[in-house]
């Protein structure tokens, strides 16, 4: 969309950008990019599309970061599956792309919303920019379905914003053009900086009461599909063993709303006075709690970026990771999903002060901030 000055000379080009969000991580990581685009409003006409893949978790973050959508597809249904999401989105997206006529669609990461948005854009011959490009485990089903979603998006995108050199190397091995790959860091670090400077960001009352007891806090999160079943049983058994072994340790477990997680808790999580299940936290409260935890146990991908930046030692409850940089930097350990291994790794960090201190140092393997501005400069 050219802008013409009074002498009828074209002085710049305004790009119409459509930023697609579907989940809470999408909102958290793309909010800094949206704000950077809006600061450069003379070059970009920026619109936000929210698919509502995870409406309940994402809605408060839309308000918090002030990135209210121009379009809301409202697709979330009870018990939804990846296939159900992928089936509903393309037609809705195609109609919206036809009406909006964006020059470029921006997607993040590896959600089913991102994959569908990239595919629909490709069908309309619209350029796709992929933020957080190049993450790989090499295992098709771990994480599921994210590993294949991000591989598919790579083939559909023509601009790849990779957080690290390792991510860039992954893309090069897949014969992606070097000119289309740019190292930017991850914009989640920009979001973290915003939250940590917000005095209103605080853990909820119940978590604050637990923290006030002065015990060492383990922050637990677990919700990955590939961990459902025996792996989940082993994780919960390990948690029970850890609190039995260490009398000054308490576990705070914000429970993911996925019904499968609630079923696993009911069946396998020990009823112990120092294991505390709490409601899901909004992101600012969660980050504040993370910053106060002694140790983190999680199967989350995003926490592998956030915990190192806050200097919180992390045991990754997975058999593979697409964020090997956190492990290589000494900020995380790949603990797996075996009960004895998880207990052993936790014991080491809870009893060896030197080993703990070596991990409890802020590190920035995914960039130290400024990713959103770099992305906008490249656009």
Image: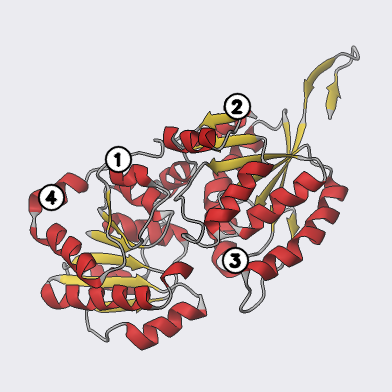
Would residue 371 appear left or right of 155 to someone viewing this image? Answer: left
Q: Which is nearer the eye, 308 or 178?
A: 178
Point out the tag, 1 or 2, that comes first from the N-terminus.
Answer: 1
Quadrant containing the C terminus in the rendered view: top right
Dividing the picture into quadrants, the one containing residue 211 is bottom left
| 93 over 267 or under it: above or below | above
Q: Secondary structure at mark 2?
A: helix
Point out the tag, 1 or 3, that comes first from the N-terminus.
Answer: 3
**Mark 2 Cα-neighbour bin, 10 Å: few <14, some 14–19, many ≥20:** few
* x 70%, y 32%: residue: 41
Q: Are marks 2 and 3 in contact (CB under 8 Å)?
A: no
Name the residue beneath numbered marker 2: 377
Query: Residue 210: image x %, image y %?
Result: 25, 72
Disc 3 and disc 4: Cα gap in Å?
38 Å
Would residue 281 appear left or right of 3 to someone viewing this image? Answer: left
Q: Secondary structure at mark 1?
A: loop
* x 91%, y 15%: residue: 8
Point out the tag, 1 or 4, that comes first from the N-terminus.
Answer: 4
Q: Are marks 1 and 4 in contact (CB under 8 Å)?
A: no
Dividing the picture into quadrants, the one containing residue 92 is bottom right
**Mark 4 Cα-neighbour bin, 10 Å: few <14, some 14–19, many ≥20:** few
Q: Are marks 1 and 3 in contact (CB under 8 Å)?
A: no
Dividing the picture into quadrants, the one containing residue 18 is top right
Name the residue beneath numbered marker 3: 54
């Amino acid at each position: 969309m050219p802008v013409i000055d009074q002498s009828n000379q074209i002085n710049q080009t305004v790009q119409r950008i459509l930023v697609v969000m579907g989940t809470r991580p999408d909102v958290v990581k793309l909010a800094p990019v949206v704000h950077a685009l809006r600061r450069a409003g003379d070059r970009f006409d920026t619109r936000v599309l929210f698919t509502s893949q995870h409406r309940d978790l994402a809605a408060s973050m839309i308000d918090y970061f002030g990135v209210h959508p121009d379009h809301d597809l409202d697709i979330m249904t009870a018990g939804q599956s990846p296939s159900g999401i992928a089936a509903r989105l393309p037609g809705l997206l195609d109609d919206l792309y036809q009406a909006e006529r964006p020059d470029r669609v921006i997607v993040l990461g590896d959600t089913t919303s991102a994959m569908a948005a990239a595919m629909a854009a490709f069908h309309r011959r619209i350029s796709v920019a992929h933020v957080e490009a190049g993450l790989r485990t090499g295992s098709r089903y771990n994480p599921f379905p994210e590993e294949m979603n991000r591989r598919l998006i790579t083939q559909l995108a023509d601009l790849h914003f990779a957080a690290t050199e390792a991510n860039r190397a992954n893309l090069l091995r897949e014969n992606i053009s070097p000119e289309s790959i740019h190292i930017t860091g991850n914009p989640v670090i920009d979001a973290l900086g915003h939250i940590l400077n917000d005095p209103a960001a605080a853990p909820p009352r119940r978590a604050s009461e637990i923290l006030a007891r002065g015990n060492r806090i383990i922050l637990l999160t677990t919700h990955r599909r590939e961990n459902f079943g025996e792996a989940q049983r082993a994780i919960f058994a390990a948690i029970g063993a850890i609190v039995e072994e260490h009398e000054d340790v308490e576990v705070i477990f914000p429970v993911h709303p996925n019904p499968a997680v609630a079923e696993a808790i009911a069946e396998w999580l020990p009823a112990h006075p120092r294991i505390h299940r709490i409601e899901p936290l909004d992101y600012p409260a969660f980050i504040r709690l993370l910053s106060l935890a002694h140790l983190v146990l999680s199967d989350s991908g995003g926490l592998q970026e956030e915990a190192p930046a806050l200097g919180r030692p992390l045991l990754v409850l997975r058999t593979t990771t697409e964020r090997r940089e956190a492990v290589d930097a000494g900020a995380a350990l790949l603990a797996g999903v075996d009960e004895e291994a998880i207990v052993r790794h936790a014991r080491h960090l809870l009893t060896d002060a030197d080993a703990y201190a070596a991990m409890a140092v802020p590190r920035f393997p995914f960039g130290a901030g400024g990713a959103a501005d770099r992305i906008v400069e490249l656009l």
